[in-house]
Amino acid sequence: MTIEAIRQAVINDPENKEMTEKGWTPIFSATPNTKIVLIGQAPGIKTQLRRDVFRDQSGDRLRKWLNVSEETFYETGEIAVLPLDFYFPGKAKTGDLPPRPGFFEKWHPLLLKEMPEVELIVLIGSYAQKAYLKKEVKKTMTATVKAYQEYLPKYFPIPHPSPLNFRWLNRNPDFETQIVPELQKIVHQILKG
C-alpha cells in the first residue's frame, strides 16, 4: 500500500466520515525517503483549515530545536509529521480534545511500513510519549523528557513547542541548554547521512 493509498483509505474510512463531509483532509506528511518522524497530538483547528502542519509559531520553535531550515523541514520529505489523529478532535474546556482512541494504532503502522529509512521518531508531548513508550514512559512528561537517553536511538521525547508552553520551558531551562543540543546533533547526523 502506498502512502497516497493510505491517505485515501483514511479519507474513505467510515470513522472519518464526519470530517470528510466537512471537507477536511487528513493532516500528516510522509514520504518513502523520510528519515525522521515527528509524532504529536492532533492538528489544531487552524492547522486543519490550512491543511498544513507546523506553519506557525510552534513550527518556528520546533525547527529551531531541530536546527533545520524550512526547506529541509517542508520540502525534502526527510522529515515526516504523523499526529496521533489526523483530524482536529474538537474543543475541550481547556485546549483541544485528545486524539481519538485507536486512531494511531490503525494508521501509523501502515505508514511507518512505507518509510523504511526512518532512523528517529521524535515524540512531541505527553500523548505521543504515552502512546509510543507505553510502560517505559515516566510518571511525568518532564521526567520522560529528562530521561531521553533511555529511549535512544529509536525515540527522542520532547515537550510541545507551542508558545503556550512557556511556563514549562521557564521551569526547565536545561531542556533548551542541554537536551536540545543533543537532539540537534542526532538530527544533523541522520540528515547528513
Image (cartoon, helix red, strand yellow):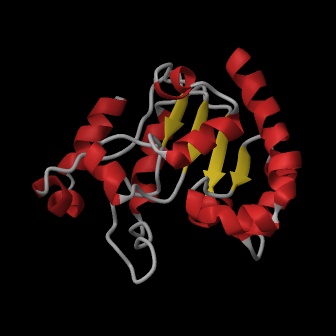
* Residue occupying image coordinates x 42% and y 36%: 29
Q: Residue furthest top?
A: 192
In the image, residue 75 above or below residue 145: above
- Residue 74: image location, x then y, percent: 47, 27
In the image, is 155 to the left or to the right of 124? Answer: right
In the image, is 55 to the left or to the right of 63? Answer: left
In the image, is 177 to the left or to the right of 66? Answer: right
In the image, residue 88 above or below residue 140: above
* Residue occupying image coordinates x 67% and y 58%: 159
In the image, is 174 to the left or to the right of 134? Answer: right
* Residue occupying image coordinates x 49% and y 23%: 77
In the image, residue 86 above or below residue 165: above
- Residue 128: image location, x then y, percent: 58, 59
Question: Does residue 134 show up?
Answer: no
Quarter where residue 65 is shown: top right
The quadrant the C terminus occupies is: top right
Q: Residue furthest bottom?
A: 93
Q: Nearer the viewer, residue 57 or 78?
A: 57
Q: Nearer the viewer, residue 10 or 113?
A: 10
How many numbered circles does the render carry?
Answer: 0
Quarter where residue 35 is shown: top right
Q: Nearer the viewer, residue 164 or 128?
A: 164
- Residue 73: image location, x then y, percent: 54, 28
- Residue 146: image location, x then y, percent: 84, 59
The quadrant the N terminus occupies is: top left
* Residue occupying image coordinates x 24% and y 46%: 25
Question: Does residue 34 show up?
Answer: yes
